[in-house]
Image (cartoon, helix red, strand yellow):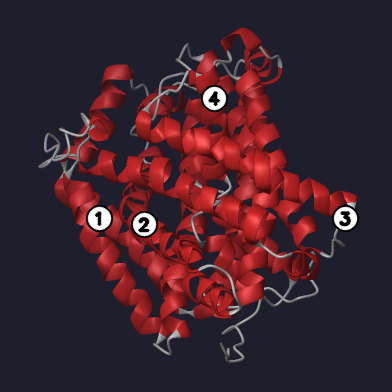
Amino acid sequence: MSEAVVTPKATWTSRSTFLMAAIGCAVGLGNLWRFPYIAGQNGGSAFIMVYIGFVFILGVPLIMSELAIGREGKMSAVETMNRLIARGYHPIWKIIGWISILVPILGLSYYCVIAGWSVEYIFKAAMGEFTGVDAAGSGAIFQASQDNVFVLIGWFSIFLFTTVFIISKGVKNGLEKAVKVMLPALFIILVFLAIYAMSTGDSAKAIDFLINPDFTKLTPRAILEALGQALFSLAIGVGGLITYGAYLPDDVSLPKSAGLIAIADTMVALLAGFAIFPIVFEYGLEPSEGPGLIFATLPIAFGQMPGGILFGTLFFILLSFAALSSTVGMLEPIVSWFVDKGKSRVKMAWGAGVIAWSIGMFMVLSFNVLVDYKPLDFIPLYEGKNLFGIMDYTVANVLIPINALFLGLFAGWAMTNEMAKKQFGFPHGSKEFTLWRISTKYIATFSITLVVYMMIFGNPF
């Protein structure tokens, strides 16, 4: 079957710009919102050590594989897989491309709702709304925000269409300019907050919680959740890394890039822990509070600590930057697909944004008008979940792990030695090649299969 020669619509202007974009795609609410409470629920440092192990044993090889697939095809995820199939790969691998489009469009619809909270909370913190607030008061502020349909719609819309505007400008004038501002600012703010929290909060307890492992708290389920968090945090299976890889010049080392992405992503997660847990312990909060830790619990501390207005404001600015760097990585795979078909980037960016916004309206309403509407209650997997819960669980706990599994299967069992050598620079039979192949072929596929099983059918242990 003949194949037309296709070049990507754009390339990154430098390796450092690509790395910032790829790190931004990975770094997001998964690091700053989800990681702290997941670590808190699973005992802290023992969980973190397992999580870091998964990041480097499985995460790095899978990041390498996603980038390699994208650079080999030099197109969107769907068209890249079509090109590889035209070269002789089995048609079943189309599923990677399609899930890499489905996950971002569904993910945007609810992720931007949470991100909208972070923007709203910038102004709440800056105006001193948390000053002197207690648990009941903080909960009331959060609940009032969720109950107000128009406020939720407003912040959700502002965040989503900011993402659309950036992507509509293209790779060089949109993506690159945005990440060049957001990523350095994100790291600077996070380091400042971690230093400030460690100096004013209970640093001794935080260090003990984050560094001294208690393996008695490490259950089989916690190990699987550490793997799931590693996949979620690194944005493996979301589609952004395949798309970003398509814009990557051939002379950039994928193994080094994957390693740097994993290191930066892990640093953000750990710094988030050092910025949050000293405050949690200083003010007698519960580290295993759950998803409400950021929006309902931490404001109590911001209202009591010295410099709490500044700290709280910067914290939610940080959260917003991290979320935005991820949402642009979600929208780009969708728009890239249409651009490959000759469509206008601007029109497709706004069109995709309107679709995500329309789906997102149901996510907004699930916090108020439709809070008790649970249409899939008869399915054990979705029992007790409203529309937002259904979407969140489906994307984060079903579609992303399934796509990560297919990526591992493709990399480990289908990717030819020639393609691997071309993209990674590893000669067949070398130590590096053998480690990459074993990780993707056996360790990743077995481990992710367990995660998928647990998420769909429940705890196997």
Query: Residues under labels 2 and 3: Cα distance?
Result: 41 Å
Residue corresponding to mark 3? 429
Q: Amino acid at mark 4?
A: Ala
In contact (CB < 8 Å): disc 1 and disc 2? yes
Residue 408 in view (yes/no) = yes
The quarter of the picture where residue 426 lies is bottom right
- Mark 4, secondary structure of its residue: helix
Spatial CA distance of label 2 from label 4 is 25 Å
Residue at point 41% right, 80% down? 338
Mark sitting earlier along the chain (1/3):
1
Q: Earlier in the sequence, mark 2 or mark 3?
A: 2
Instruction: Report if residue 184 is visible in the image.
Output: no
Gap between marks 1 and 3 measured at Cα = 49 Å
Q: Label 3 near label 1: C-beta < 8 Å?
A: no
Q: Is residue 429 above or below residue 382?
A: below
Residue farthest toward the top in the current orientation of the protein: 216
Q: Position of residue 234 (x, y in %)?
A: 58, 47
Residue under pointer 1: 360
The residue mark sitting in front, 2 or 3, is: 3
From the image, tell me which residue sits under label 4: 39
Would you call the spot at circle 4 few (<14 residues within 10 Å), some (14-19), or many (20 or more)? many
Circle 2: residue type: Leu
Nearest to viewer (mark 4 / mark 3): 3
Which is nearer the N-term, disc 4 or disc 3? 4
Q: Is residue 18 above or below residue 368?
A: below
SS of the residue at dot 2? helix
Q: How many marks?
A: 4
Residue at the image position 25 percent from the left and 35 percent from the top:
382
Q: Earlier in the sequence, mark 4 or mark 1?
A: 4
